[in-house]
Image: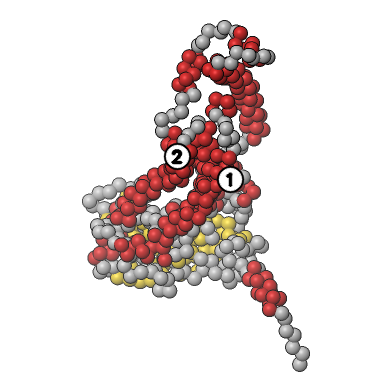
Amino acid sequence: MIQIRLPPLLLLLQVLSTSLVLADESDHFYKPGDVVHLWVNKIGPYSNPQEAYEYYTLPYCHPKNEAHEEHRPEIDADAFNIKNVLTAGKRGEWSIGEVLGGHKLRGSGYSIFFPKEGKSETVTEKECTKELSAKEAALFEKAVLERYFYQLYLDDLPVWGMVGELVDPKSGEIMSEYSENHQAHIYTHRTLVINYDGDSGRIITVDLISAKDSLVPIKPNTKVSFELDVQWQPNTSDLTYDTRFVRYLDSAFFAHTIHWFSLLNSGMMVLFLLGILSFILLRTLRRDILKAGMAADGIDDIEGEGASLLASEEEQSGWKILSTEVFRVPSFLPLLSALLGSGTQVLTTMIGVVVFCVLGPLHGNVYESRDELLSTMIYLFTLCTIAAGYVSGRTFKIWGGKHKYWQMTMVLTLVMLPMFFTAVFGILNTLSLWHGTIYTIPIWTILKLAALYGCISLPLGVFGTMLGRASVSSKGHHVSLL
């Protein structure tokens, strides 16, 4: 028997190539029988989407194989719990953008499998049957009275559903306004309708339907059975995988096409007019500054343009009367330079984010991902620290700041804006942690942000300051440079 032994490198390449062709949620390609994960995200009042909590804050059934802690934060929590701070980052692998955006996905525990090509089927998943305690019934009743809704994700497609409804016990009709005679009911049967393309193995649309006849009154010590129907349908709509997010957009706003040629034409015209105006103003300012500089130095033997400037006896008007104040070094030059540098950092970040969004067709539209926009903002803000250091260092040296204060300028530029953000987010995060909302930033995410600042922002800021100072001549002065 002949045995063929492959080198270790070839074996490694073979394993990697095999893993690359497997279908999963990351590349959105599925084969018949592949697992399709249904994730639960958050829950909160319909009238205030900014007030959101984790899905399992309500006593829904959760999978036994998930790492769900025994003590879940409650909606009406009235005490600070340091355990939530230390364990929040260990409960899921979420990106920085997802955490800051309030997206903390958990496994739902449902076994959903991709069907065969062109096959329509409905599979009923029985979640669980549980007896509601008095505390759990109070939580569900509170959620229904405040019209809580929840959000789920399947193949990165979001779906929403209501926790329950207020029902008139006499007529059995769903009521939109609260009354003492109305009773809170909870939905116990939901249907997940999934349209898919069997040829490409991709999911096109996802909808969630809550059955009206499954409304059950919320009462303590009563058993409630939660069920989910998964209905697979071949895609018959005009939507494709590339356009599946169009249905989530505001059609009234996005119905109008962007006239790129008109925008380019208008932009070029504005740049042309600004260029002409800037040339005229700079030429006039250079002549006036040159004349003021020669008069201040008491130069008599001048030829050419300088002689003609001194020979002309124009009346001093406008800013030339205040020339000494115009060229006066500011009283708080380090602070001014730091403010200019921080403003430049924010401006360049905004421009970068806008350009990134405009180039969406090249890398994928930002609304197709939960964390792409926020992550882009954070990373661009981190990289733009070099622009802040450059502007602050250059401004400080142009205005002739004292050499011993340039380090102070650099430190102010690097810590002023981050300290402001830290103070604001610290207060908001404390309030969020106190009330147990999903927008609480865990300690592990804070450490990641601190690492980005310490390992990337600080070196780039120092490097930008050195570049800004080196771009100005050591013998230069703000008057001669202008």
Amino acid carrying mark 1 in the image: Phe
Q: Looking at the image, is 196 positioned above or below residue 300?
A: below
**Residue at left offset 33%, top offset 56%:** 433
**Residue at left offset 60%, top offset 11%:** 310
> Is residue 459 at all visible to an observer of this figure?
yes
Total numbered labels placed on residues in the image: 2
Amino acid carrying mark 2 in the image: Tyr
In terms of secondary structure, where does tag 1 sit? helix
Where is mark 1, residue-wise? Answer: 356
Q: CA distance from mark 1 to mark 2?
A: 37 Å
Residue 378 image position (x, y, % from top left): 50, 50
Farthest residue in the left direction?
180
Residue 469 image position (x, y, % from top left): 55, 39
Asked if residue 474 lies left or right of residue 453, the reply is: right
Q: Looking at the image, is 240 positioned above or below residue 294?
A: below
**Residue at left offset 41%, top offset 70%:** 67
Asked if residue 426 lies left or right of residue 320, the reply is: left
* Closer to the camera in the image, 48 or 476: 476
Q: Give neighbour class at mark 1: few <14, some 14-19, many 20+ (Cα, 10 Å).
A: some
